Amino acid sequence: MRLGSIIHFSLRILTRDLKARFLAKLVDEQIITAGFVSMARADEKGRKVLAEQTRELIMILEKELVGKDFFGGKTVGFLDLVAGSVIPFCLERGWEGIGLEVISEEKFPEYKRWVKNLEKVDFVKDCIPPKEKHVEHMNHMGERIRSA
């Protein structure tokens, strides 16, 4: 990648869009927290409550994706990187490891379509760990936290 294209890409990603920044903060401070705590809870009732809270928060993102390929429109933007770096490839795989379905295709069709679009982006593909090993790793981390 040439310096000019890196600068152009960086300026596109570093957004002035207040809504994208607000939603990125929502992902960082609420969705990630509720999601990881739901994996770490030892009791099933607590997991389900936190999973439902996470669903409600992700529904906010679902509504933002209607009619768009990415949060940034036709191209990957700031919020795509923030949400895409954790929700589909860490949280969902962690939930899969404990047998908890939080984000179903039926309730979150726009989100699931967005994940598929994200998986097609070259620089995202290069960063996604192999699914089976990642699920195993996330499950192991959850077990360690629950046993502490």
Image (cartoon, grey):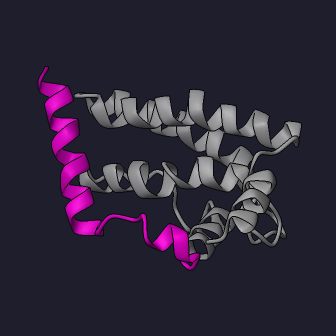
**At 67% across and 33% down in the image, what residue appears?**
26
Q: Is residue 70 visible?
A: no
Q: Relative to 110, say whether 13 is above or below.
A: above
Q: Is residue 123 magenta?
A: yes
Q: Nearer the viewer, residue 114 or 76?
A: 76
Q: Let me know if residue 131 appears in the view.
A: yes
Residue lying farthest to the front in this orientation: 3
Q: Position of residue 9 (x, y in %)?
A: 74, 61
Percent coordinates x, y for residue 87 in the rendering: 50, 50
The quarter of the picture where residue 7 lies is bottom right
Q: Which image quarter is the N terminus in?
A: bottom right
Q: Tell me if residue 39 comes above or below residue 116 in the rendering.
A: above
User: The magenta stretch spans which residues?
Assistant: 119-148
| Left or right of 88 in this view: 27 | right
Query: Can you name the residue that lies furthest to the top here?
Result: 148
Q: Looking at the rendering, in which quadrant would you find the C terminus?
A: top left
Residue 99 position, x and y percent, is 28, 54
State the image coordinates of residue 78 (x, y, percent, origin top left): 71, 50
Task: Identify the residue at image location x=58%, y=27%.
Answer: 29
47 relative to 122 in the view: left or right:
left
